[in-house]
Amino acid sequence: MNKDIFLIGSGQTRFGEWWEKSLRDLAGEAVEAALKDAPCTSLDIDMVIVANMIAERTNGQAHLGALVSSLFPHNPPALRVESACASGAVALHTACGLLESGRAQTIVVVGVEKMTDVSTEEVADALMGAADSEKDAPCGLTFPGIFGLIAKRYMHEYHLTRERLNHVSSAHHRNALHNPFAQFRKEIPAEHISQSPAVADPLCMLDCSPVSDGAAACILSTVKESDIKIAASQLASDAVSLTERATITSFPATKRAMEKALAEADIDRKSVSHLEIHDCFSIAAVINVEDLGFAEPGKGVELYEQADPVPSINASGGLKACGHPVAATGIKQVTDMAKQLRTSGSRFGLTQNFGGACASCGIHILEHTHV
Ligand code: COA
C-alpha cells in the first residue's frame, strides 16, 4: 500500500430475513455499529462508498450513494460500486485508492442488500445479471445451475464424491454456531447436506448460500489509527462467460489477485492464519482454497475433512451459514476478519470475495499490528 490505511471501525446487521427493515434502515444500522466501534464521529467521515448489486430489481431503489450519505448530518460526497457479489471487495478497493491518493482521509464503506422482498425466482433472475447475458443466460442457467455444472465437471476431473463434498457446508454451519450475526445457527451433520432438496444436480439446497438481507460497514482512515491495517487490497478479472474459460474447475482471477496481494503485503501465504473465502456454493469453497494455494488441485476438500485446518477457513460460518446479501458480503468478511485477528492474536488474515463465477475477485490482507 502507498500509505498506511487503518480499519478504525466496523460493524454489521445480523444477516437474514428483515422484512420490517428497509435498505436505508439496514445501511444505517451497519454504519451506526461501525461508528460506535471507531475513534471518530460521523462528522469525521469525508466520503461514503456504497456497495450494492440488485437494489433496482429487488427494492426499486437506485442512487444509493446519496441515499446513505443522507444518513450523515453533513451529507458527505458519495458513490456506489457494483461488481456483482464482489461489490463489497471492489468498494473497499476503491476506498483504498481514494485514501492513497489523498482525495479522502476517512471513508465509510457500506455494503447493503435486501433480497427477500421478492420471490426466489426473481432474485435468481436478478443475480443472473452477474453472468454473460448473451452467451450463458439464454440457455436457461441460474447461478445454482452454473455452479452445478462446475461441481459436475470438478467431480469428473478429480473423482470427488458427493459424500466428501458434504463436509464443506457442514463445517460452515458448525462454525456459525457461535456467530450472533449469522442467518443460520444450527449444526447440520454432513450426511444431511446431500439429503436436502436437489437444486442443480449435484448441488442440493444445503450446498447453496441463502437469499439474505443485511448490511456491513467498515471505516478506513489514513489519519486515525487502530491495531488493524490493510496490508493489501487487490483485484483481478476474468471472462464473464464460462464459454470463454480454458477450465471451469479453477478460477484464474483468484490466483492472480492472490499473487498480487501476497506481493503487496510482502508475505508468504504461510503467514496467513485465517481465511474468509467466498463459499457461495460448497464447490466454490473447494476450488477457492486450491486457487489460493492452500491445497493442491483436486485436494481442497481435504482441508474440510480436518477438525482444525490451518489456516482456519470461514470461522464466521461463511456465506453458507452467515447468509449472503450479495454486496454486503465482502465488507462483512473484513469485519469478521478483524475480530478473528484480535481474538486469536494472529498477525495476518485474508478475505477473498468474488463476483459471478469469479469473473471479478477481490482479496484483502489484514494485519494485526499489536502482535
Ligand atoms: N441454506 C439453508 N437453509 C435454506 C437455504 C439455504 N441456502 N435456502 C432456504 N433455506 C431455508 C429457509 O430458511 C426456509 O426455512 P424455514 O421453512 O424454516 O423458514 C426453507 O429453507 C425454505 O426456504 P425458501 O426460501 O422457500 O427456499 P427456496 O427453495 O426458495 O430457495 C435456494 C432455496 C437454495 C434455491 C436459494 O436459497 C438460492 O437460490 N440460493 C442461491 C443464491 C445465489 O445464487 N446467490 C448468489 C451466489 S453467486
Image: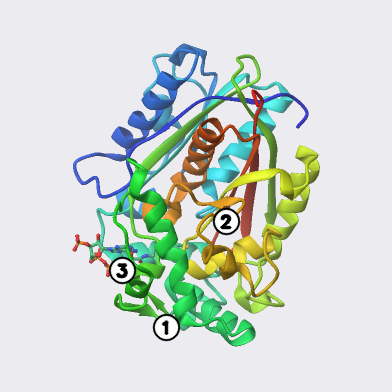
Q: Residue at x 78, y 42 (%)?
A: 267
First in sequence, mark 1 or 3: give its number.
3
Marks 1 and 2 close (CB-CB < 8 Å): no
> In the image, 339: left or right of 210?
right
- Residue 24 makes an appearance in the image: yes
Could you tell me which secondary element the residue under label 3 belongs to? helix
First in sequence, mark 2 or 3: give its number.
3
Q: Amino acid at mark 2?
A: Pro
Mark 2 packing: few (<14 Cα in 10 Å), some, or many (20+)? few
Q: Residue at x 44, y 21 (%)?
A: 37
Q: Amino acid at mark 3?
A: Glu
Q: Where is residue 300 drawn, in percent x and y? A: 61, 68
Mark 1 packing: few (<14 Cα in 10 Å), some, or many (20+)? few
Q: Give the residue at mark 3.
A: 121
First in sequence, mark 1 or 2: give its number.
1
Q: Residue at x 60, y 14 (%)?
A: 224
- Residue 320 makes an appearance in the image: no
> In the image, 248: left or right of 130?
right
Could you tell me which secondary element the residue under label 1 belongs to? loop
Q: Which mark is residue 201?
A: 1
Q: Give the residue at mark 2.
A: 309
Q: Amino acid at mark 1?
A: Asp
147 above or below 122? Answer: below
Q: Where is residue 268 drawn, in percent x and y? A: 78, 46
In the depicted view, which residue is nearer to us: 89 or 352?
352
29 above or below 301? Answer: above
